[in-house]
Amino acid sequence: MERIRIYFKPIWYNIVRHKAYAGFCVLGTMLTFVFITILLQVAYVILCDTAPAIAADRIVSVPFVLRDNKGEAVKGLNRSDIRTLMNNVREDVRYTSYHYEAVDIMVNGRYDEYGIYFVDRDYWNVFQFEFVQGHFFTEGEMQMPCVIVNENFVRSFFPDKSVINKEIQIEGNTYRITGVVADVSYFAPQGKASLWVPEKFSKNESNDWVETYILYPENMDAETMVRSVTNAYQFFVKTYYNIDKSVSVRQISTEKQFIRKMYGGDLFLSGVGVMIFILLVVPVLNIVLLSMANTSVQTREIGLKRALGASKRTSFLFILVENLLLVITGTVLGILLTVPVCRGIDWIVFSNSIEGQMMLLPRLNWTIIFISVLPLALLFSFLSGGIPAYLTVKRPIIDMLKGGMK
């Protein structure tokens, strides 16, 4: 322990002596890794199967607007249409259809306009939300004025967290809360939803269109699932609307395919890589220049240590460890600030959204932190501290004793 204290004492002394450099290094690293952490967390939500669509590769969406072979809209599909269409799907599947409406609500004396999903009972089997309170609608509750909300809705409208059996007003009617689901990212499938009501209570004031998702069994490939829905869809439109080739079938895809296509597919991965590169390189260049200036102040001291027998490796590590401590401190602060920054973004972007209480990132995925963010922090430290350290220790001792940088 004493040897460790002796080793780190001069490093700590240098950090305290050069407060401006240390502060800039920590601040620059912190800001860099706030945005790198957000970017990697969002990329994980988009590219991987996360709640509520943990089976996104087995969920196939049905186009809710029927178009003819010229792309002209013929009609929006309602629940009756979907039941007829599903009779032609041969596989053993589960499916859900829901209708979306914007309605007026009142909670604890507060009025607001909100988007509500009117769902059937199988919605909770196709999309698997985590319930933190209560449960999904039972068979009996599907006939009762009940509502399920998300955690963010509870935080926004209720002073305490226990809300089961509490009431909210929707279009002047009283609904009882039967469940609370964990928040999910805005970028996840169904990430825009925060209120769910049984389908029976939909008034269909504007239209009766429904969005439909079909959950296929495991061990089926995406091509087979999409072909199954395409065949059923084509048969339906040919039989009932005499349309040979509806362009709507081009929209049939799995949720995983749809999400990736919506965000650019392979270009999204390239974009993430380019953004991470920029977020790393720009601050690295700034810190390298400052580190070189800071190291030049220590050159005579390092040269004296070399003259007294210290190796190049020891001198290199001395400079690198100092930078590593600053970078790790900034990285940890950046990670800790990620959620507060996301809450600020939520407030700016989503606070007035009619769709409901949405979130950029409800929580951090610590696996991404350990396998992606921390390795990037080590790379950041090696580049920003290693380059100036190498340029310093490679110089002849006599030049170092003169001080300054070449």
Image: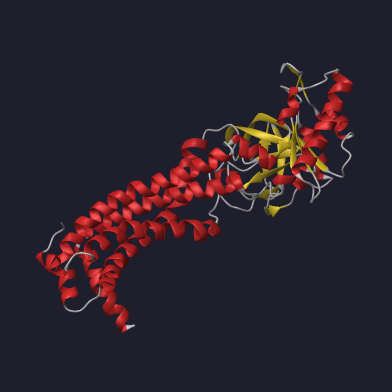
Quadrant in the rendering for residue 172: top right
What's the residue at 65%, 49% (across, down)? 49
User: Where does the image place residue 105, in percent across and percent down from the top left?
Assistant: 63, 33
Question: Which residue lies most toward the bottom here?
Answer: 2
* Outermost residue toward the left in this view: 402
Note whether residue 269 is visible: yes
Q: Nearer the viewer, residue 210 or 60?
A: 60
Q: Quadrant of the C terminus?
A: bottom left
Q: Is residue 68 left or right of residue 9?
A: right
Image quadrant of residue 79?
Answer: top right
Q: What is the number of callouts on the image?
A: 0
Q: Nearer the viewer, residue 310 or 228?
A: 310
The residue under the point 28% across, 76% down is 7
Quadrant that contains the N terminus: bottom left
In screen coordinates, is 62 left or right of 270?
A: right
Q: How is the image coloured?
A: secondary structure
- Judged left or right of residue 16, residue 64 is right
- Residue 136 as seen in the image, left or right of residue 2: right
Q: Position of residue 275 (x, y in %)?
A: 44, 43
| Residue 259 point in image, percent of width and height | 63, 39
Residue at (54%, 43%) from the top-left corner? 269
- Residue 14 sits above or below residue 228 on the image: below
Residue 154 in view of the camera: no
